[in-house]
Amino acid sequence: MKELAGRLTALDPDAGAAVRVIAYFDRLAESRAGVEALVRAAAVLSGCPARLVDPERRVHVRVEPDGVRRDTDEPPDPRWPSARLSPDGTATLWLERAGVASGVVDADLGGSAPRTLTADRTDTGRGGAASYAVDGDRPGVAPRGGDTGRTGPASGGLATDRAGAAAGVGDTDRTGSASGASKADRGAASQAVGTGRAGAVASRVGGAGPSRVAPSVVDAVILERAAGVLRLVLDRTRGRAPADDPALVETLLDGTAPEAARLHAARRLGLDTSVPARALAPLNERPRVVPAGTQADAVGRLGVGPAVPVLELPRSWTEARTALRFTAEGTPQDPGPRVVYAEELGGIALLADLVVPGAEPPPDVRALETAAATTPWLSATLHAVASTASLRAAASEINVHHSTLQDRLAHAEHLLGWPVRTPQGRLRLQLALAMRHLARP
């Protein structure tokens, strides 16, 4: 590999540097280097800060070109060159090279060339700058003269400037103190870009708008190789779990499981343990857990537990299952809400402890069932009366005239045996309808 790199360097300095970068990241992969060590290598070799942002796994690592870790809350600049760890993922490795337009590379572990910004090569003379392509079909053509825009050190001094920084390619702790790499690693990091050109080449696309600056060949190779190895390391050490992994959800909702196990399950599910979450209880489906601000999507009946800290999710799950019992199919035969939030039940939730599913229902529920069996319109009419603010609103709800509703209610009162148009009778009706849902097997 060294002999090949040496020969390529004589023909094309960028190609030789790229080969050295590939070999260097291959060695890091073989030594099972960690996430921070890989981000550090990208920073050292590129001569600019490197940053890994993986929102799904809650991983944020930023390393300066001197090898020291310095995290920041500032969001990445979309103009920086970057590489996604997988084509359809959100995890991204960034090189903080100022003035560089976005050129996202899809890391391909199968060894294909990086695919990023494409611009036609335009020679401006042997000593001038040239725009180039970096994609899966054409090799990158490096500038033959001085780089434009903000660049790293010139090729002649690149090895000297980065040799010292390469000493920090080993892991560091959170405070940024380098553990120190071996002499062989330091030398390899220095040689990896010893003749490569850092920085970027300016090019215009379509002749209009601001200058579009593409990453250098060396930067593109650093991004592609580092992103590929980082993907493997993250999958191995912080494996990606499905958002509804049944075993992890079960652990998270089990109040008897150790707290450490539940926190581990939450992280594997991609939950931020500092943000409240809700348990969802869908009918005849597996339970789910979502962050508090997430809209609860439901195809059928769904009980939604209250938003609680992650470690209190077992309580949210219990209340979600109670809320599910208050749901209905939303049909004329079974009117009512298909989605019920536990926190909206209030004291009505206490009824769930009094009515046993499948047992003999209370007398008022039996009266409702008997009346509904012989009167098809009864259930929808009584639900409209119980859930709206006035009889006129109830008539509008079921699309009948107000006088028709009055006639229906007079008949319903005769069947039920109590008035439903008085405050006391309406409350009795509301309780009877709620208990009817709770009594279902």
Image (cartoon, rainbow, N blue to C red):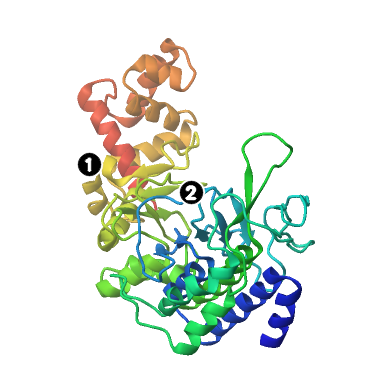
Q: Classify 10 Å Cα crowding around label 1: few (below 14), some (14-19), many (20 and above).
A: few
Where is residue 279 shown, x and y percent of the image? 35, 55
- Residue under label 1, please give it: 346
In the depicted view, which residue is nearer to us: 122 or 366? 122
Q: Using residue 350 as the reference point, say whether residue 104 is left or right of it.
A: right
Where is residue 318 shown, x and y percent of the image? 29, 58
In the depicted view, which residue is nearer to us: 93 or 393? 93
Does dot 2 land on a helix, a strand or a loop? loop
Q: Classify 10 Å Cα crowding around label 2: few (below 14), some (14-19), many (20 and above).
A: some
Where is residue 209 shown, x and y percent of the image? 65, 34
Q: Quadrant of the N terminus?
A: bottom right
Q: Residue at x 47, y 42 (%)?
A: 329
Q: Is residue 54 above or below residue 103?
A: below
Does dot 1 land on a helix, a strand or a loop? helix
- Residue under label 2, please give it: 77
Q: Using residue 162 as the reference point, say whether residue 303 is left or right of it.
A: left
Q: Using residue 140 as the reference point, say whether residue 309 is left or right of it.
A: left
Q: Is residue 247 above or below residue 29?
A: above
Instruction: Give the distance between the C-alpha atoms of the residues marked 1 and 2, in whole angstroms.
Output: 47 Å
